[in-house]
Image: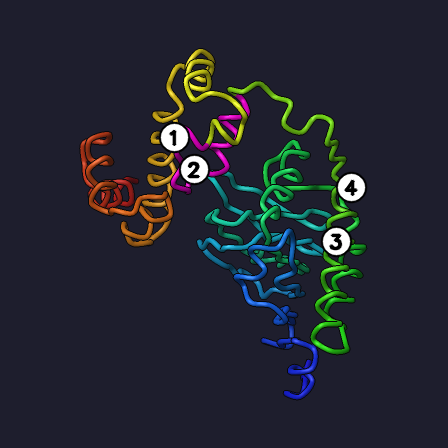
Amino acid sequence: MEIAQQDMEKTNLLCYTGLMIEYKETRHTLQQKQISDLSLYSAGYEACAPGHHYGPIYRAYQLIHFILSGKGVLEIDGHTFQLGAGDAFLIPSGKIAYYAADAADPWCYTWINFLGINSQMYTYQLIASSPEPYILRGLDTQKYHALIEQILSLEGTATARYFKGNGLLLQVLGELFQDAGFDERYWGKNSVADETKFYLDVNYSEKLKLKEVAHNLGVHPNYLTRVFHEKYGVTPKQYLLNLKLQKACQLLRTTDLPVAVIAGSMGFDDGMAFSKLFKKTYSCAPSDYRRKEKAAP
């Protein structure tokens, strides 16, 4: 698939190979997109080569991939999913993920990426609608392919393409919320302890403060701590630290990312503070932990 340079400039269309094509919205900056309610970042299509993989990596925007044919695997947040045609996988911003096409039957997928103040909430509402985290199954993915193809075919001025592209993004999300069976009557109706745990599970990589978490949930910090401890046996602060360290251990075992990068992805500004906490908890430095785990049979 060859596209003239003048056409790429006209349509924001990028052709990386004969098997991959992507549209990137360039009317507004990333900063402008982030402070909007919802804004298209990019959309695309790829017929992957056998074993083609991406990551581990985390991004600052939300991703949704719709699998049209073939098979592949997704690894995210300690979960591994085997996926095929009719499945979609969602990767929220800030989550480290790895995905790879099957070596014998590589997948072909289409995707859409978006940002905005409420974009993460919309993504987690979809995730909460499925029995499997990050995965929606049994979809008519060709329907989503048709909508995304319209984005890849956008024409007109930059402003016209901006509005058309965001309109198609809303159509994709509208169809997805309907197919996922999302029911807003039950969103956020769990107990304070469950809501707190979900909030921590989702945002563990951020620099969270108990007062801010309690404020977001509309309760007093002391009440939040008490009900959380009653249900889970630890304080929210200790639960969060344990969670960060567990995620860090996973990354040390499964990636070659520098310790400083792993510490930063867990919300630690100071790599030394992270290493000190890690050593206090596991009686060894992060680098020693990695060597021992990778040397184990």
Residue tagged 1: 240
**Residue occupying image coordinates x 63% and y 77%:** 15
Q: Farthest residue toward the top?
A: 230
Disc 1 and disc 3 in contact, CB within 8 angstroms: no
- Percent position of residue 68, x then y: 72, 56
Scheme of colours in the image:
rainbow
Q: CA distance from mark 4 to mark 2?
A: 29 Å
Counting residues from the start of the chain, the first of labels 2 and 3 encountered is 3
Quadrant of the drawing holding the C terminus: top left
Identify the residue under disc 4.
179
Q: Is residue 19 visible?
A: yes
Kind of element beneath mark 2: loop
Depth check, front residue: 80 or 272? 272
Crowd band around label 2 with a 10 angstrom C-alpha radius: few (<14), some (14–19), many (20+)? many
Q: Estimate the x, y position of residue 228 in percent, counting from the top left.
A: 45, 17
Residue 20 appears in view: no
Task: Name which of mark 3 and mark 4 comes first in the sequence.
Answer: 3
Lower position in the chain sequence, tag 4 or tag 2: 4
Distance (Cα) linking label 1 and label 2: 7 Å
State yes or no: discs 1 and 2 in contact (Cβ < 8 Å). Answer: yes
Q: CA distance from mark 1 to mark 3?
A: 34 Å
Q: Amino acid at mark 3?
A: Leu
- Quarter of the image with the N terminus is bottom right
Read off the magenta span: 194-212
Name the amino acid type tagged 2: Tyr
For image coordinates 71% across by 72% down, the residue present is 159
What's the CA distance linking mark 4 and mark 1? Answer: 33 Å
The residue tagged 3 is 170
Residue carrying label 2: 204
